[in-house]
Amino acid sequence: MADERDEIRARIDIVELVGREIHLTQQGKTWKGLCPFHQDKNPSFTVSRQTGRYKCWSCGESGDIFNWVMKRQNVEFADALRTLAKEAGVTLASRGTPVPPSVRQAQEGAMDETLTFFREHLAKSTMAREYCERRGLDEETLKTWEIGYAPEVSGALAVHLKKKGFTLAECKKLFLVEEDSQGGYFDKFRGRLMFPIRDEKGALVAFGGRLLGDGVPKYINSSDTDLYRKSKVLYGMSRARHNFGKDRRAVLVEGYLDVIACHRAGVGSALASLGTSLSEDHAKLLKRWVEEVVILYDSDSAGQKAADRAVSILSAEGLRVRVALMPSGEDPDTLLRNAGPAAVQQAVETGLSPVDYKMQALELKRPQMAAEQFWNTAVQLLADAPNEMELDRHLLRLAGQYPGITDVSRAQQALRREVNKIRTRSQDKKVEQAPTVRAFQPKQLQGELSSAELVVFRAFLSPEYRRSGWMFARSRDLFESALAIRISDAITQAFPGAAPEGEPAVWLHQFQQEEMRQIISDLLLDVRADHLTETYIADTVELLKQKREKRQLRQIRKGNLDTAKRQEYLLKLREHKPDALKKQQSDDSLLD
Ligand SMILES: [Zn+2]
C-alpha cells in the first residue's frame, strides 16, 4: 500500500498540481501564492517541491498531494488516491475500488463512441441541421461545442454500441440506454439535440439533450453515474477556465444555449449548472478558479429565485458576487440573436452588488407590501452591505421616505441605528458560531530550538550532509530543548538503520506523526541551510557536546541522578573533559 503512494508521490509534482489552481511564484526553494483556504491578502501559502508539501503560514493549513486533493475536491482519501493514481499512471492493486481501470476504460470508450454517433447523426439529419440554423448555431459553433443529434429511432444507439462491442448493461449505468421489460435496450435520448458535458479537465462525463420541437421534458440530462456527479460539474468549465482572466471572473448562466451564446458573444468565461440548481460543490469548484461570479439569469420570477439562491451559496463560499438580470423576456441566446454580441457583454457589465440587486427587487414588490414590512426587510438587507459607501448610498436614498421623521439627516441616523442593531446581533451570533482557528506561529518553531540544534537538523535535511546529520541527529543527549529531543527520537524511530536517501518528498511520510512531518518541512523552508559546511557542522556538534557536558556536570552537582546515570556521565566526562572533573574533585569527592 505504501508503495503505491510512494510511486504516486514520486510522479506527481506538487508545484504543478497546486499551480493549476493557484498562481504561484518561485521564491528561492519554495513557491508562494494566495492561500485558497482563507481570505488571503498577502501570499502566505507556500509549496515545496523538496518536501512535496504545502503550507499556509497564516491559517496553518498544510499537507501533501493527497491532502490537497482531499481538501480541494472535498473527497475522501480513497478518492484522492484514485484521482492521483490515474494521473500518475499508477495502477492501484484492487482493494475494493468501485471501478476497476478496465471498466473505467470501457466506460470512457462507450462515451466517446456515443459522441461520435451523435455527431454523425447530426450531419445526416436535415431536420436537426435546420433547427440549428434557426437557432443561429453555425458550423463552427457545432464543431466547437461538439453538438450532435440523437435520432428518433429507438434503439439506434443501443444497436450501434452493441455492434462496437460494448456491453449494454454497462452502457445503461452511463445513462446512455435503458432496459425494457423484455430485457431489450432502448436509447435514453431520442429526437434531441445533444450536448456533450465535459468536466473541468475536459473528460467527457455526461450528455444533455434538448428536444427539437415542443414537448416535455424539453431537456434531459444524464443523472449521476460513475463518471459524472452533476453537483460537481459545470457546463462550459473546460473552455471557460481558460478565459477567467486576470480579474478572475466567471459568468454563471442557466443553460447550454446560454453558455454557447455568451462564448460566441465574446463572454468566454460563461458556464452553467445543468438541470440542477447551483450546489455548494459548484461554488467550491468555482472558488478554486475565480474570485468573482456574475450571475446572468432570466429576469422572470424563477430566474430571480434561482439568482437569490446562487447569491447565498456563492457568497457563503467567499466569492464576490454580482447579479445581472437579462432584459425581460430575453436570455443570452435570444439577446445575442436579437441584439448582437455587444448587448450580451453589456448585460454582464451591468451586474449589481447583491445588496443593490435585492433592494431593487424589494422596491419592485413595495407597492404590495405593508410599510412596516418594507422597512424591516430593507434594514435587514442593508445590514449585509459589504462597505460603508454602499450603505450610505442606500441610507441617503431611503431617508427621505422614512416614516415619522421629516428631517432627512435624522431619518438617516435612525435608519443607521436600526442597521447597527441587526449587525451587532449577527456579529454576536458569528462569534458564538466561529470555529476555533488553529493558531500557528511560524517563528515559534525556530524559537523552540537553539541555533546549534537547528544546524544538526538542517544537516540531516540537506542531501550533502545527510549522513553525518543523521548520525548526530540520533544522539538524543546532544539536545537540550524538548522539541529537539522529540525530533531526534522521531528520526531514530523513522530511520533506525540508515539515513534516508533522496528528496524529503520521498521519505517524509516515514515519520509516523503528521505533526512531525510538518515540523520537518518547516525546518526545510529555512534558507540558512544553504550555508552549511562540514566544518561548520563539526564545530556546532562540538559546541553541543560542550553544552552537554556542562549540563551533565550541573546534574551531577545537583545530586539528583541515580547511580547508573551518574556513573555514565562521570565516565564520559572523565574521557572528554578531565579538566572539568579535576575542578569538581577538589570540592567534593565525585569519583568513587
Ligand atoms: Zn491560509
Image (cartoon, rainbow, N blue to C red):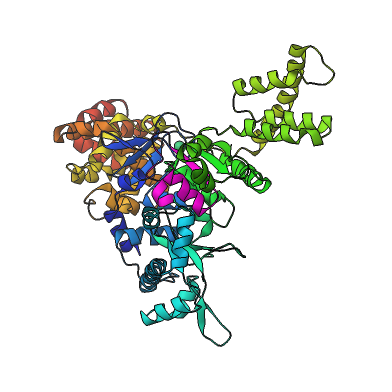
Q: Would you say 297 lies left or right of 409 here?
A: left
Where residue 7 appears, x then y in whole percent?
Answer: 28, 59
Q: Where are the magenta residues, as a range? A: 237-265
- The picture quadrant where one finds residue 484 is top left
Query: Foreground: 75 or 476?
Result: 75
Farthest residue in the bottom direction? Answer: 182
Question: Which quarter of the figure is the N terminus placed in?
Answer: bottom left
Residue 258 counted in the magenta span? yes
Q: Is residue 561 visible?
A: no
Rendered-image quarter of ligand 1? top left
Q: Would you say 71 lies left or right of 398 here?
A: left
What residue lies at 31% left-to-right and 44% top-to-bottom? 15
Residue 241 counted in the magenta span? yes
Where residue 235 appears, x then y in whole percent?
Answer: 47, 53
Question: Which quarter of the figure is the C terminus placed in?
Answer: top left
Query: Foreground: 186 or 559?
Result: 186
What residue lies at 24% left-to-right and 28% top-to-bottom? 580
Q: Is residue 168 visible?
A: yes
Where residue 167 appears, x then y in whole percent?
Answer: 42, 80
Where residue 119 appears, x then y in whole percent?
Answer: 39, 66
Query: Foreground: 457 or 15?
Result: 15
